[in-house]
Image: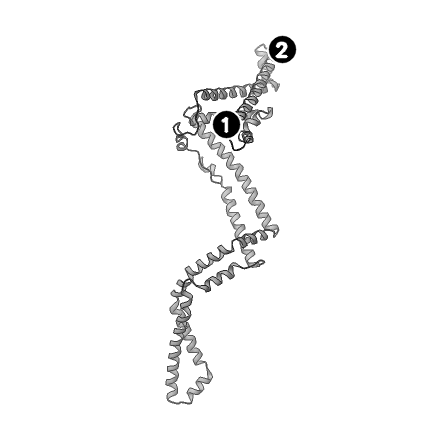
Amino acid sequence: MTIKAPNTTDIESHRPSSSPYKHSRLNLIYDMTMVAGIIINLCLLGVEYVLGANLAWVNDTMRFLHVSPASELGLKESIHDINTFFTIFLIIELLIRWGIAIVQRRYYRWFFFPFIHWYEVLGCFAILRPLRLLRAFVIAYRLYLLGYPVLPRSWIRKGQFYYELVLEELSDRIVLQVIDGISTEFTENQTHYVLIEKIIAKHRPMISRALIEALEASLPNAIKMHQASISQYVAAAVERSIQNTPELQQILKLMPVVGTLLSQRIEAIGARLGENIALELIYPLTEQPNPLYAEVAHQIGTLDFPAPEIEALIDSIVIETLKVVREQVSIQQWKAKL
């Protein structure tokens, strides 16, 4: 599935003068403090996890540093208290910002805030605390757009790339699952014909107009292109009809001398007559607008189900289309960008 590749042009095109974000100095200090606090909190969470995992190398390090069990326990409790305090702080800070968003009517509905900031809400839970790093990246990226290089450009580009990689892989899996489900539905039952019939019934006027335009655009030119061959065929058909009429030939044989000349003359007149008939038949088929084409298009557009040939055609078109879409979605565009 095609996604927009992160590139230097996109990164460099965001400048403070054109950025949608507007920060005061207080907001800037607050954001940078939050980034630093979140990073420190995550480091402390890592330390707490390592100390609580009872790893052999950690115990060896504690013994090497001559840290007593009581001091080690006190260190664990202190780090745990700091992490708990920071979690409570994040919850209160989140609620305050939610209240500010409600007062300032930043979103269409008051309850949109926790859904838009879902990673912050989930980061308040103990098991999902690593998601706090995502908020740090969001703040850092926003500061970068404002012109403050909190993170190196290479980090931003790589972050965008891997974000879009994950997004592409997830969306591709969902789309492929949906396509496979539709293909199974088409091959295992016939309920989709009801939907197709409703769609066709809704678009019958458009189908008729499209058929009229197609007929009027192609048939008159095709008939004019073959006008000479049609006239010759009709003339030859009339001439053969005269030759294959026994009663006429019997009458002409009763006239020994005049009969032969008269037969040739009648055949020539018949050929000319056939050409004129062909021209008269062709003319109404080439005029526009043509009521005959409208009637043909209307009859085709009002075909009713069940029609085995049409059903087979629709099945084939839809299934082949799904196959093409599936093949296109299966292409991993991010690999081509590496």
In-front residue for pair 47/226: 226
Q: Position of residue 9 (x, y in %)?
A: 39, 33
Locate the C terminus by quadrant: top left
In-front residue for pair 32/250: 32
Answer with the quarter of the image where residue 91 lies: top right
Q: Position of residue 189 (x, y in %)?
A: 62, 51
- Disc 1, SS: helix
In-front residue for pair 182/143: 143
Mark 1 residue type:
Gln
Which residue is identified by label 1? 104
Above or below 337: residue 37: above
Above or below 98: residue 183: below
Mark 2 residue type:
Ala
Please give the name of the residue rendered at 46% of the width and 63% of the height, measured from the top-left corner.
293
Q: Is residue 259 left or right of residue 207?
A: left
Would residue 134 be visible to someone looking at this image?
no
Would residue 333 be visible to someone looking at this image?
yes
Which residue is identified by label 2? 70
Please give the name of the residue rendered at 61% of the width and 50% of the height, measured from the top-left corner.
188
Q: Position of residue 126 (x, y in %)?
A: 60, 24
Above or below 154: residue 267: below
